[in-house]
Amino acid sequence: MSVHEELDQALRELESTMKAADMWRMERPEPEAFDSLQPFCIDTMALPQWLRFVFIARLEALVEARAPLPSTCDVAPAVDAYLIQEGARTSERVLMCKVVERIDQLVTEN
């Protein structure tokens, strides 16, 4: 299996995990929210919005184009910190962090 196929599979798993944790259904941010210069668009989006509309969307585009992946990816610590701050259940936090760590690993190692 190619890295793009593995990444596509991991992105589907992240989507499923977000849906199970009720973190998928949300409004699309306003167009100007995407212009943020802050990491994770922290000043214009909640982290789940960023995951869905920026992180997943951009990686899906790279997978579809079979394009080169970024040299590094380190999103899992931000996801973990956000979920702790929001008081997410431990089981949801562990599942979310595990799948995002897998995506981080796939991107960084390739």
Image (cartoon, rainbow, N blue to C red):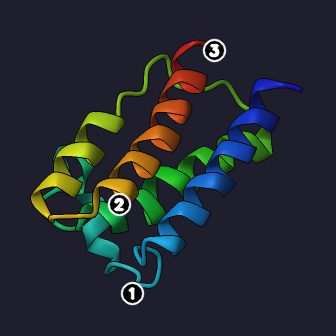
Q: Quadrant of the C terminus?
A: top right
Q: Which residue is the extreme one toward the top?
A: 109
Q: Residues within 10 Å of mark 2 (few under 14, many from 20)?
A: many
Q: Mark 2: which secondary structure?
A: helix
Q: Which residue is mark 2?
A: 50
Please provide percent x and percent y for residue 98. Answer: 47, 39
Q: Which amino acid type corresponds to the residue marked 3 in the rendered image? A: Asn
- Disc 2 vs disc 1: Cβ atoms closer than 8 Å? no
Q: Where is residue 89 shown, x and y percent of the image?
A: 28, 63
Q: At 34% from the left edge and 65% from the top edge, which residue is drawn?
A: 48
The residue under the point 78% across, 41% down is 65
36 up-or-down from 109: above or below: below
Left or right of 86, for residue 67: right
Mark 3 element type? loop
Disc 1 designates what residue? 27
**Nearest the eye: 78 or 83:** 83
Above or below for 109 versus 32: above
Do callouts 1 and 3 mark residues in contact (Cβ within 8 Å)?
A: no
Q: How many marks?
A: 3
Identify the image quadrant of residue 2.
Answer: top right
Q: Earlier in the sequence, mark 3 or mark 2?
A: 2
